[in-house]
Amino acid sequence: MIHEVDGDLLRRGCKPPLDSISLTVRLLGPGTDLQPSGKSHYTMAQSYCKFSSPVCVSESIPPMNRLSAASHAWLLCLLTILRLSPLPSALAATWSVDVSSTENGNLQILLDDSSFATYSYRDPQISRPYFANIVVPGGIKVTRNHPPAAGDADDHRDLHPGLWLAFGDISGNDYWRLRAPVKHLRFVERPTVAGSELRFAVENAYLSQTASSVVCQEVCRYQLRASEQGVLLRWDSTFRSDRDDFTFGDQEEMGLGVRLATPIAVRSLQGGRILDSEGRRNEQETWGKQAEWCDYSGTISGVFAGVLLMPSPDNFRQSWYHSRDYGFVAANPFGRQAFTKGEPSRVVVKRGDDFHLRYAVFIHWSSTAAGFDPAAVYANCWPRP
């Protein structure tokens, strides 16, 4: 009898909710009451486990004549969970997309057949693209409900739909406050799944406030990769105009923003916290400060979850963080005067030149705050030469 378990488990220091782990168990050989080489999926009930020493599966499982094949598989799953892997690795997860909603300008993204997020690119109310209703295992939303639901703070209901990239000033046009529109032109790359990754790319036109002319165009490439501790979203945007120069201005409301689920907000007094790479905490210490990364996390429905913003160190300037205790944070490399009262920032992109902005976003979950190390995630994401 050969017992083969597909999928790595529980990276160093991470004890995610067990209902987030879908184990594939393959039983091979004669004498089983499961089809040889067939697969059965077992989803564990939500709880957490800590185990300080390895378990020897081969010595711990009773003989097959004492347990049915199904019971044997269940025990094998449980014992495998208890064997904590010391190294980070990819989660045996499956991405898929529901294209039936694309007629309405929405791309439904699924992870292991459960909703993970909606990418909205043609919303009649919100004239810029965004990700909404991002969900961690167990069906727990880590971003604020969109639209806000009962019990949610109702501020910025259209401006803070989930996760977005926007700018309060490009050549005098305000895309953050929806005073000028961003028009989806096409999918440069249709959604493609390869292993534990999902990729797609879009082209957007940033129109003038009257929508009468194009200020610049953007090609944005998204890559989502699942791991045992979360989903890493790489966000790579290239801006260009072949007609005229364009200029990024200086405001607080520029860059990559996220609105967290209401229970995670510091102001909700349920244990949420903002933490940056310098060890500063919450709005009072992190607002207007530059840092390599900034994490907004808290406990929601018994799971420690949150969103870690990690601008690329190759961006033209390190980001300041527009961080608020009510559940919002944005990584902004443009707001020098807005945050420091220093010289105004004015980033001019010449006609025919490319301007790049790259970010990584880690949507994470674990049993406790101690089980998540944002500095290690950043180091793995943007390794130093």
Image (cartoon, rainbow, N blue to C red):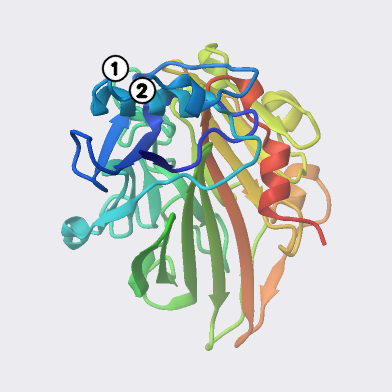
Q: Residues within 10 Å of mark 2 (few under 14, many from 20)?
A: few
x 70%, y 51%: residue: 335
- Image mark for residue 66: 1
Residue 176 visible at all: no
Camera-side residue of 121 and 339:
121
**Residue 289, image x, y percentages:** 77, 39
Q: Amino acid at mark 1?
A: Arg
x 48%, y 73%: residue: 219
- Tell me: residue 236, above or below residue 147: below
Q: Quadrant of residue 72?
A: top left
x 18%, y 43%: residue: 35
Indicate the secondary structure of the residue bearing disc 1.
Answer: loop
**Residue 259, image x, y percentages:** 48, 36
- Image mark for residue 78: none
**Residue 234, image x, y percentages:** 54, 57
- Image mark for residue 63: 2
Camera-side residue of 217 and 181:
217
Relative side of 76 to 309, left or right: left
